[in-house]
Image (cartoon, rainbow, N blue to C red):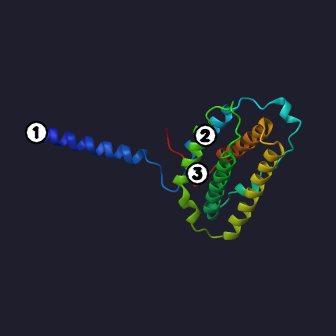
Amino acid sequence: MAALHAFTWLCTVIFCMAQVCSMPTPCRLQKRIMNTCYDILDKMGGRFPLHCLESTAPVPFPEAAFEYSTSQQTVSLEKTIYLTLTNISSLFDEDSIPDQWKNVENFQNIIYRQIEENQCIMSKTQDSQEDFLRREKAVIEYFDKILAVLKEKNYQLCGWEFVRKEVLITLKFILNKDLKDVLFSSQG
């Protein structure tokens, strides 16, 4: 009887540990989830249509907004990435997303989950508010330009493909940076 009790207790402990270990880290952006978003978006619409290339003006990516050289910039960068995700979410809230794109809802839900689980990032304090404001301005200007191109293209396929291409560039840039203090990398 004691062995059965000990076994039951051990199973309960293991189950609880499994639940805790699988829970998202509070207030930490999940690299695995961002990778999933990138993969879904990459496969969503296929290759960029050649006929759309001639009519799109380049929108320079704001690399400076994602600079990261000291630990004092960690909170500013977390906020910048969070702001980027909220801007991506806003773009994809439009009703005119191409019907031929696959898994749009899945992409939207994953981005939304990352935003909802990490709202607390925006309440973190940092050493330099000015640093974040500079980053915020660059990110907002970037997404305003993307939205302007989408509107200019009357929310047609070429405009959406431009949006998809720019968001892929953004996510890839974030994922390729060494952000071990900013993005939580879970194994699995």
Q: Position of residue 152 (x, y in %)?
A: 84, 46
Mark 3 or mark 2, whichever is nearer to me: 2
Q: Could you tell me how many numbered marks the image carries?
A: 3
- Horizontally, residue 38 falls left or right of residue 188, namely right
Seen from this angle, which residue lies furthest left? 1
Q: How far is disc 1 from disc 2 in space, using C-alphas? A: 50 Å
Residue 14 vs residue 169: left or right? left
* Residue 180 marker: 3
In the image, residue 86 lies at what x, y percent?
Answer: 64, 53
Residue type for callout 2: Phe
Mark 3 touches mark 2? (CB < 8 Å): no
Residue 171, quarter of the rendered image: top right
| Disc nearest the viewer among 3 and 1 | 1
Q: Earlier in the sequence, mark 3 or mark 1?
A: 1
For disc 2, the neighbor class at 10 Å (few under 14, some 14 to 19, many from 20) is many
Instruction: Say whether residue 36 is left or right of residue 153.
Output: left
Q: Position of residue 74 (x, y in %)?
A: 61, 60
Helix, strand, or loop for circle 1?
loop
Relative to residue 187, is residue 133 drawn left or right? Answer: right
Give the residue displayed 28% in from the left and 45% down from the top: 13
Image mark for residue 107: 2
Q: Which residue is mark 1?
A: 1
